[in-house]
Amino acid sequence: MPAMPEGAVDAYPLTPMQQGILYHVLAEPGGGRYVQQVACELTGDLDAEAFRRAWQATVDRHEVLRSAFYWEGLSEPLQVVHAAAEPEWTVLDHRDLDDAERARALARFREADLARGIDLGRAPLMRCALLRTDADRHLFLWTHHHIVLDGPSFTLVLTEVLDRYSSADRYRERPVPPFRDHVAQVRATDRDAALAFWRSRLAEVDAPTAIPGLRRSTDRSAPAAETHHALEPGLAARLDAFGRRQRLGAATLAAAAWARAVGLLAGTTDVVFGMTMGGRPVGIPDAESMVGLFINTVPVRVRLRSAGVSPEWLAEVQDELLAVRDVEQTPLVDAQGCAGVPRGVPLFESLLLVQSYADDPPRGRAGITLEVVGSEPPRTGYPVTMMVVPGEGWRIRLVHDTASLDQDGARRLLDAFAWALGTLPDGPDAPTSCPAVRDVVRVQAAGTFTVTAMADTVEFWLRTLGTAMTVGFGRYGHLHQELLEPGGPLARAAYRLLFVRPEDLAPPDEPDALTSAVDDLATMIGGLDTGLSLVVLCPPADDAPYRDGVPRLRERLGAVPRVDVADAMDLCRPYGVDRVHDPAAARAGHVPYTPEFLAALATGALRRVLAAADPGPAALVLDGDGLLWDGAAAEDATAADAGSPGRAVVRAATAWRAAGRPVALAARGARADVERALARFCPALDPGELAVVRVGWDPVSTAVGAVAAELGLPEEELIYLTADPVNWADVRSNRTRVWSTLVRSSAFVDHLWTLDLAPAGWPAGGARGAG
């Protein structure tokens, strides 16, 4: 190690949790993810200087509060203890401001304070601000870094400060064990035994548990948001009594409920989530007086049972948590390395934190009262963090990354968790249908070949879009069995994607067998009395023997209620797939098609389902110039060339009208010129058959607003297509709720998912709520 920094008295390695925090801080410089700002209201005759001395004495006593972190040029990072460290103090007086000005000033100060972040290389990793708001009232801000303090330590520090303030002359200071004792204890654990444990739990886990509505995001600047809930007093008391009767701890109840909520939402019986474990060190004298970061995050895997909540299952959950406690200080990177998830993919995307300590410091001391009045939502590095405070009320706090999960998705998770907690005492009679799950669309895919090869593409789109949808995939060769299973995934799904390859149904030299197989398949699909089915006809390796059979498939299956039949090549058309069949199919586990074809097929099929499950805008509004015809004005219009968007737009508009969806025109120009251009170049869009025509010399945003009013639709139900950047900017600026889209090419229109329509064989409104 290089020479110790000036003033340093000790140095030692980091705990696993500290290593993880440092990794995230270095990967996201300036992100402020682990900077915590706590606001406390102090009421009474405060001696500001004595309060400051109490803080300094507390920092002097605990070496972790005098530590900084060093990593450059070192084989491993170190935390270095300094002999002395003085927190930065800011003192301001806002008594001369009125209430509104004071509130704005305090908000600006807090925002600027958070934006500063904290330099990990400069001790102490904290600062204080005392803002006087009235004669006997102060707002105290304590900003510190999570790398040195966990929740229980936060309470211990505040309690000690108040004790010192109230009895400075009488305060009895006892020696505190150094934090290095805890670090040494952690590093002495048996790593080989821990890795063997995690391999036994995680080797089969190859993907994180998918949370419906969660989208992939690299936006680290998006703020965190939080949603709160408290169980009704009677329900909370019932849950506590149930835990005592069954001898189940609060952590077990919370873990079981979280696994059940996520499993029901995700449509899986195998749930993996992160859990914050650890408390005061065991075996170190006076450990209860130590402060620092003693917790660690580890994965927890829970397998659900189909029937209610049995005592045996809850005992299994508790036993698993007890087993995890023996290896709770394993670095998360080691645990993840024991799983089957690919490198770069997280093992879990939700974190459960069950508070096992009193979070409120003593309020009254020496003529003042202290009340914690606010803190920033913690940024844990995970898209979803469920924080639980057991006891009276069972307070629940869900913190989520707003770039990864919207408010509706957060509320759905919170409601599902509250429901799961409240139904635990019902035991085996606990309901298996959660109201919050009704908003999640269930899709099940199956086929006559291995359809799981499309799972990665589907998962990519669901995460990219943040759609509240789950898609399950059946096993190869089990299509008919799954169709006949009354309570199986296909029967329970709101939407079914059934991929059928003719040669999988019958040999090519037995046409009668193919006819019989088609009839049997149609009968089985027709026997599913809920949900909607999209049957995708996939191309055979040799088309000739099945040339007559494929029309039979289309005709017979198309006559089945709630079924739409699609040609796989039509679904793939926008993506220009060149190679369809994989020459190595015989060696590729019953996957007869190329990866690019399967990716295009999965995308096209998912678009069909999304068009029904989430129909998007209700009305299509078109511009004219440069979109439906080439030219800057209708009087100079010429036919759109092959690369222009006109032909694709007309094709989409014609499909919308055929589906009974309104199509309108909102354009600038002389009406006679526009109608003449429509008649010459877009005869399929007769102005007399359009829902609304608004043409004139007013700004096009005015025309679009008039279209919405005449159709009686809110503006968010309109999508406006234009090829003119000026018109696009006008609508985008002045009709902010309209989906204003700048179209550049015909290919762009083919890739515009908001123009997709639900299959004609499915009823209006789709199958939302089914399954």
Image (spheres, grey):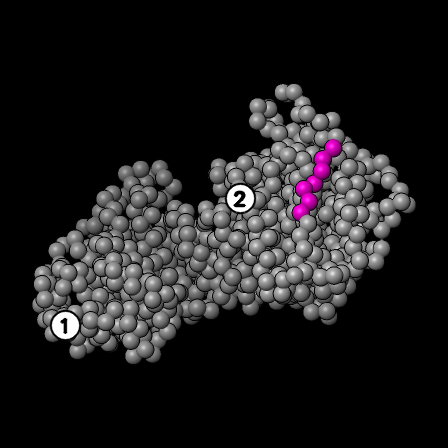
Looking at the rendered structure, the number of numbered marks drawn on it comes to 2
Mark 1 touches mark 2? (CB < 8 Å): no
Q: Residues within 10 Å of mark 2 (few under 14, many from 20)?
A: some
Residue behind mark 1: 670
The quadrant of the picture occupied by the N terminus is top right
88 within the magenta span: yes
Element marked by disc 2? loop
Q: Residue at x 32, y 69 (%)?
A: 718
397 within the magenta span: no
x, y percent for residue 477: 40, 50
Between 661 and 116, the one lying in front of the other is 116
x, y percent for residue 163: 83, 49
Q: Which mark is residue 476?
A: none
- Magenta-highlighted residues: 84-90
Residue type for callout 1: Ala
Between 647 and 251, the one lying in front of the other is 647
